[in-house]
Image (spheres, helix red, strand yellow):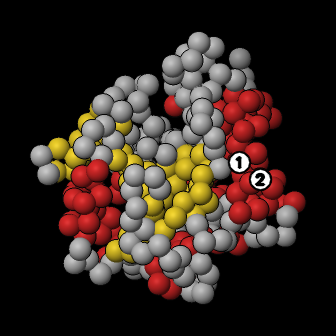
Amino acid sequence: MRTTGKALFCHLYMLLLFVGFCQGKDLFFNDKGLLLPESYKIGWMEAIDDDKLISDITIPGTHDTMALYGGPAAECQAWELGDQLRAGIRYLDLRIFAFENKLYVMHWVVYQHKSFYEVLDTIRAFLSEFRSEAVLIRVKPDLFDKENVEELIGEMIIDDTDVWVKSDMPTMAEARGKMIFVQKSSFKLGIPLLETDSKGDYEVTHIADKENKIVKHLTQASGDCGGDYIVLSYSSGTGIGTLLGMFLTPKKVAEKIDPWLDQYLRQFSSDHSSACFGVIAMDFPGIDLIQTVIKINDW
């Protein structure tokens, strides 16, 4: 049977649409390795005005940044830390466990194959290459001996001039090239944090309910952004531990939420002359979603 030119064109067109759809999905949500286009702007903070406060910037972050191990119930990210930084992530969420005067990165009881010292080395290497950037670090002391975490970190960074541990909110000029620690609850080094979520908001039984919670959180964040504290909202969630959402792992939630979040942020920005959300911490974000968060600073 002979294939006409018109039929061949239709087949090729449908194939391109299918490939475009599949690639588009992966660019908002990503559970694969990082592949950046040659034109990708890694040092995006270079375009931020020197006088702008860090709290007045919309910043892409990751929830449980180092949670790459432990199976479907525990894994929240696909990229190693260096790749996250190169993709544009500038807020890190770290659970740290102190044991025998050493600091380990955890998620629940799962060791994430990195020490805190190795994490700092990765960030330092990135900032030495991209001096226009700043990396926000939130430390959550985990498991037992929580009171030792802050003391050990303080000793580790005591002579480091590229670390910000003051509670004063830095400008972009003051923050460039630095690790900016964020304080909350049991960790008191760094700039103060305001979280928009309430206890239990991370639990997901229905995706639509999670979307409504994110809208509520981001609406609050847009009103609080730019103050004396960093505003933090989460798009992450899990149904693990609930009855109705027991099969909604962090990855399955992110697979639905990340494309929706990209569309919501684009619509919000088009409806407002200016916007600021502070930090948005995500699971499994793709590079297009990260770029959408970054570009809010241009609108």
Which residue occupies the foreground of this view, 52 or 153?
153
| Left or right of 36 in this view: 122 | left
Does 35 appear above or below 19?
Answer: below
Does 266 appear above or below 77?
Answer: below
Q: Amino acid at mark 1?
A: His
| Left or right of 171 in this view: 129 | left
Q: Secondary structure at mark 1?
A: helix
Q: Residues within 10 Å of mark 1 (few under 14, many from 20)?
A: many
Q: Which residue is mark 2?
A: 219
Cα separation, mark 2 vs mark 1, equals 5 Å
Q: Quadrant of residue 122?
A: bottom left
Q: Which residue is mark 1?
A: 217
Q: Residues within 10 Å of mark 2 (few under 14, many from 20)?
A: some
Q: Residue at x 43, y 68 (%)?
A: 190
Q: Quadrant of residue 246?
A: top right
Q: Residue at x 21, y 66 (%)?
A: 156
| Percent coordinates x, y for residue 200 in the rendering | 60, 32
Quadrant occupied by the N terminus: top right
| Left or right of 226 in this view: 175 | left
Using the rendered image of the protein, determine whether residue 186 is visible from the camera's viewpoint: yes
Does 205 appear above or below 264?
Answer: above
Q: List the single residue furthest toward the left.
A: 100
Q: Residue at x 81, y 53 (%)?
A: 267
Q: Residue at x 41, y 33 (%)?
A: 75
| Percent coordinates x, y for residue 51 in the rendering | 60, 87
Does 119 appear above or below 129?
Answer: above
